[in-house]
Image (cartoon, rainbow, N blue to C red):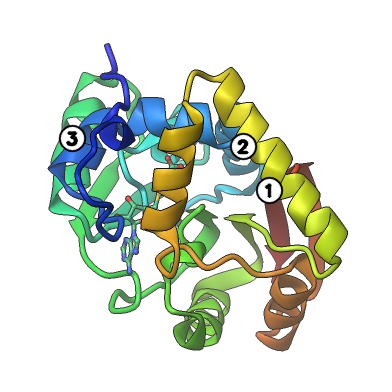
Amino acid sequence: MTNRDTIYQSDDPVASFVFDERVADVFADMINRSVPGYGTIITMIGTFAERYGRPDSICYDLGCSLGAATLSMRRQISAPACRIVAVDNSAAMISRCQQMLAKDSSTVPVELLCADILDIEIKHASLVVMNFTLQFIPPAQRSALIRKIHDGLLPGGMLVLSEKIHFEDPVLNALFIDLHHRFKEHNGYSKTEISRKRAAIENVLIPESLRTHESRLLDAGFSSFAVWFQCFNFASMVAVK
Ligand code: GEK
């Protein structure tokens, strides 16, 4: 059973958002009630892994949290000697992720690393997944990270990049932020919880436009780019080396 997210119901002063024990405890509920299309994206990451996971290669899950994308990949990969490396720098997430993996009976090997994705080596990768993680990396460090991912991918390898996005058109930007808040209200969050969470993630989660993502990916050397899923101000992109 997952615990219900009531973090922003309290009247405590709003502190900057961190991935601590309190967040890790309710994370599955939080992300499902906050990110439109999250379940679909997780399922399809498994489908990408089925297609892109190659024999004797590594599939990376960068910012794995509780391991939802890792589990989806693990259940779909059939290539021999294909393994998964899942990375998160939150010890609270990693220990819960370890428990989730222990309950799963699929056999693809998973190495779990408690580390900063800016520090790890990426090599011999057939698929790299960053499902709502790049948005937490300081913008000045994003291009170097994308280049490192590109360089660590095998030719023809894929990056799946999901992000909250910003719209350059101010009317659409305001519209989609508002519709996202309605989505959260429909999922049981109050207006106060929504505005307190918004204050907490300000300057922590920094969204960029699809155009910025596309040009960064192409500049890094990826040869193909597409948005394969979008709902309001949430999108998932693929880039092929
Ligand atoms: C999912 N992908 O369920 N190094 C490693 N991990 C990081 C870093 C970093 N520098 N910065 C943030 N994280 C998951 C959801 S959540 C998305 C990903 C969200 C980790 C952070 O600890 C958290 O677990 C994750 O990235 C982002 O498919 O909360 O909106």
Q: Amino acid type of disc 2?
A: His
* Residue 137: quarter of image: bottom left
- Ligand 1 placement by image quarter: bottom left
Circle 2 sits on which residue?
181
Q: Is residue 54 above or below residue 101?
A: below
Look at discs 3 and 2 and give the one toward the viewer: 2
How crowded is the residue under tag 3: few (<14 C-alpha within 10 Å), some, or many (20+)?
some
Circle 1 sits on which residue?
177
Q: Is residue 202 above or below residue 65?
A: below
Q: Give 102 or 136, whichever is nearer the viewer.
A: 136
How crowded is the residue under tag 2: few (<14 C-alpha within 10 Å), some, or many (20+)?
some
**Residue positioned 61% across, 37% down in the render:** 181
Q: Are marks 1 and 2 in contact (CB under 8 Å)?
A: yes
* Residue 17: quarter of image: bottom left
**Residue positioned 41% across, 46% down in the render:** 197
Circle 3 sits on which residue?
96
Q: Is residue 213 left or right of residue 70?
A: right
Q: Secondary structure at mark 1?
A: helix
